[in-house]
Amino acid sequence: MALKITLMSRINSQKLFRKISTTYSTIAAPKLQNEFEGEEIHKMAAWQIHSYGGLEELQLGRNVRIPFIQSPNEVLIKVLSSSVNPLDIAMIGGYGSTLLNKMRQLETCKTETVLEFPMTLGRDFTGEIVGKGNAVSKHFKIGDVVFGVQPPHKQGCHAQYVIADYNLIHHKPENLSIVDASCMLYTGLTAWSALQITGELCILPPKGRRILVIGASGGVGTISVQLLKAWEADVVATCRTDAVSLLKSLGVDNIIDYTQPEAMENIKSAGKYDIILDAAGLQETEFPQYIECLKDWNFAKFITLKSPLLKNTDTYGILQGMVRNAAELILPNIMMGALAKGSTLRWGYFMPINRGIKEISRLLETKQIIPVVESVMNVTELPAAYERMKNGHLRGKVVLTI
């Protein structure tokens, strides 16, 4: 493989610039210029874990090698801002490690187990393109500011630099700040996938359909209600008392305070639903009372984002875990009476789909979706940000600036 390396340096001013051209990529690495930086020009700062456990496993490293482009579809991003998601907290404890490691193994075409450590967390970001593979669309140029998302089996973006697939980035909407854009795509695609794919709104027009969002004031919930409003659905949402004003500001007309004793009665009186989206992570014992609220024989769906899929593969292994997943999806549909009324209980997931990214970007540009940020912290305060996420009851996203 032809390889050309040009290195220019001025030692006396400590300004270093490196440009590497290969068959696959062109990379321009700008100088490091903030407190969250690597010890050397070819190193970066990153929050990593070296084993599974609690938040004490988080370590700030400043001697981490800057990742390099290995595929012509990849871009190297200098991260400017990133958000914290519940999945980050779960993955510290080893959640999903069995299936995610199998995905890493398949992606690298290796027969032996792929070592996931040291692992960098972080799923969505805003950043500047500083390198691109030769197959990357001409639509993306060096220096462009983009926002993007990382699938869970990939190294994350709580670092100075991250490698991303160009299909999972989009130019930052001009009307959004770097902070606001960085918190949109992981929760946004989770909501979009649950509604469009699992809920089949990509087939059945959402306009006029009555949809209940449980736990509508969190990261996924706030985007879900805004997507549904943009699609002209009839939205009913539940939240705690202190989040009612937030949902009103997002345009939700029918808001039910679930802390009130008459909450379930109000949910039922609001009418039968085409879709109920559980963005709160209800216990399975609570599902039947909501399934009763679904429309009869109308392909109605109860969708929970609290799937046991990864937990089962962690506990029982890939094969036995998948068998158990099938049983845990089929049996509740029968035992809870969903199938008896022509309805279904389903699991919703994050899906890295380019079409979803494009639609979310369009709705952000037209201000039909507004980012909801609870707090902004410096990336050096990452453990405190994780602690805030772990405590729950967020009113929007926690964002880290670099």
Image (cartoon, grey):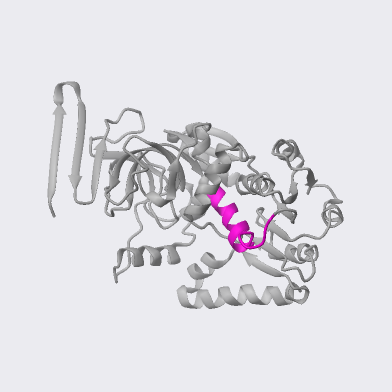
Quarter of the figure that contains the C terminus: top left
Report x, y in % for residue 306.
61, 60
Report x, y in % for residue 74.
32, 50
Confirm whether the magenta stretch covers residue 196: yes
Q: Is residue 218 above or below residue 312?
A: above
User: Could you tell me which residue is drawn at 33 percent across and 34 percent down?
Assistant: 143
Along the horizontal axis of the image, is 58 left or right of 33? Answer: right
Query: Magenta segment range?
Result: 186-206
Image quarter for residue 264? bottom right
User: Could you tell me which residue is drawn at 51 percent across and 58 percent down?
Assistant: 351
Report x, y in % for residue 279.
65, 53
Q: Nearer the viewer, residue 258 or 304?
A: 304
The main secondary structure of the magenta stretch is: helix
Q: Nearer the viewer, residue 297 or 34?
A: 297
Q: Is residue 94 above or below residue 368?
A: below
Report x, y in % for residue 249.
71, 35
Along the horizontal axis of the image, is 227 left or right of 140? Answer: right
Quarter of the figure that contains the N terminus: bottom left
Image quarter for residue 272? bottom right
Along the horizontal axis of the image, is 202 left or right of 108? Answer: right
Q: Is residue 211 above or below residue 396?
A: below
